[in-house]
Image: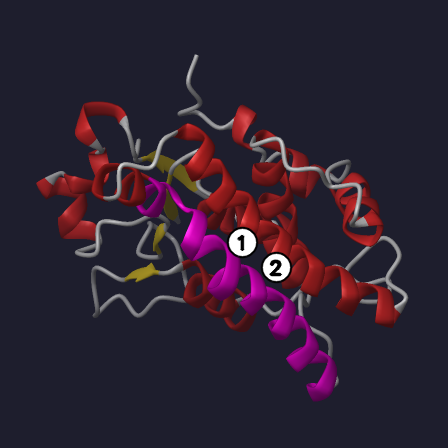
Amino acid sequence: MKLYSYFRSTAAYRVRIVLNLKQISYTIVPVHLIRNGGEQHSVEYLNVNPQGLVPSLDITAPNFDVVDPESKPQIITQSGAIIEYLEEAFPQPALLPINLTQRAYIRTLTQIIACDMHPLNNLRVLHYIEESFDCDGPEKMTWYHHWLTSGFAAIEAQLTSKGSTHYCYDDQLTIADAYLIPQVYNALRFKLDMTPYPAINRIYQHCIQLPAFSDAAPELQPDVDK
């Protein structure tokens, strides 16, 4: 498999975690979102993903026996679709509980991050509000922190009500952890005070010690800015 990725993209980060948790071999194809005006806008990459976003997962790599060789290329875009595909194509280790209600709970957590937090704080949105509305650094950071605190407060309440300890769900790693850790990493990078969220902090500190998470960290990616 080939993963088109940017080291700081939280969406790509969560996919890297899931690939690592499932012990799937993959190659990183760097797509730098800033260099050269943004490599995601290149004709070459738009042929991979017409939306010009990362991540994209090419599942047509040699010897990938799940893919029908008659239908190439096969590229999946959008991190949520990629993660759901990986869970279905590679069911072990399972990253969703068996119980349908608990699966819905896990997806609730992932959707808070993927729908209510990340889209309002990703690079292209921050650039847009800066350029279109003349938002300076402090105003942009106020916007960023507002949506993070709103989302984290909702997640913290959910985790606290479930008595979560090391993971978002009981003692099982799930896709919710793969979504949460990159979002916390990014929040810390932008100096958000995380002390109001002890359950989130506890999960974050535990998960970043696990190889699947630490190996996916931005600073260990081949395209990290030197």
Residue 129 is left or right of residue 153, and the answer is: left
Check the image and report above or below for 82 versus 42. Answer: below
Q: Indicate the position of residue 217 as horizontal and vertical percent values.
A: 58, 33
Residue 40 is left or right of residue 178, and the answer is: left
State the scheme by which the image is colored: secondary structure
Residue at the spot 72% in from the left edge and 87% down from the top edge? 101
Residue behind mark 2 = 151
Residue at the spot 21% in from the left edge and 56% down from the top edge? 51
Q: Indicate the position of residue 89 as horizontal and vertical percent values.
A: 50, 69
Q: Indicate the position of residue 156 as horizontal and vertical percent values.
A: 76, 60
Q: Which residues are magenta?
A: 100-126
Is 8 a magenta residue?
no
Name the quadrant containing residue 74. bottom left
Residue at the spot 45% in from the left edge and 44% down from the top edge? 26
Name the quadrant containing residue 60. bottom left
Check the image and report above or below for 102 versus 162. Answer: below
Residue 39 is left or right of residue 177, and the answer is: left
Looking at numbered disc 1 in the image, what kind of residue is underneath it?
Answer: Trp
Is 117 a magenta residue?
yes
Helix, strand or loop status at disc 2: helix
Q: Are marks 1 and 2 in contact (CB under 8 Å)?
A: yes
Residue behind mark 1 = 147
Task: In this rendered view, identify the residue nearer to me: 87 or 49.
Answer: 49
Looking at numbered disc 2 in the image, what kind of residue is underneath it?
Answer: Gly
Q: CA distance from mark 1 to mark 2?
A: 6 Å
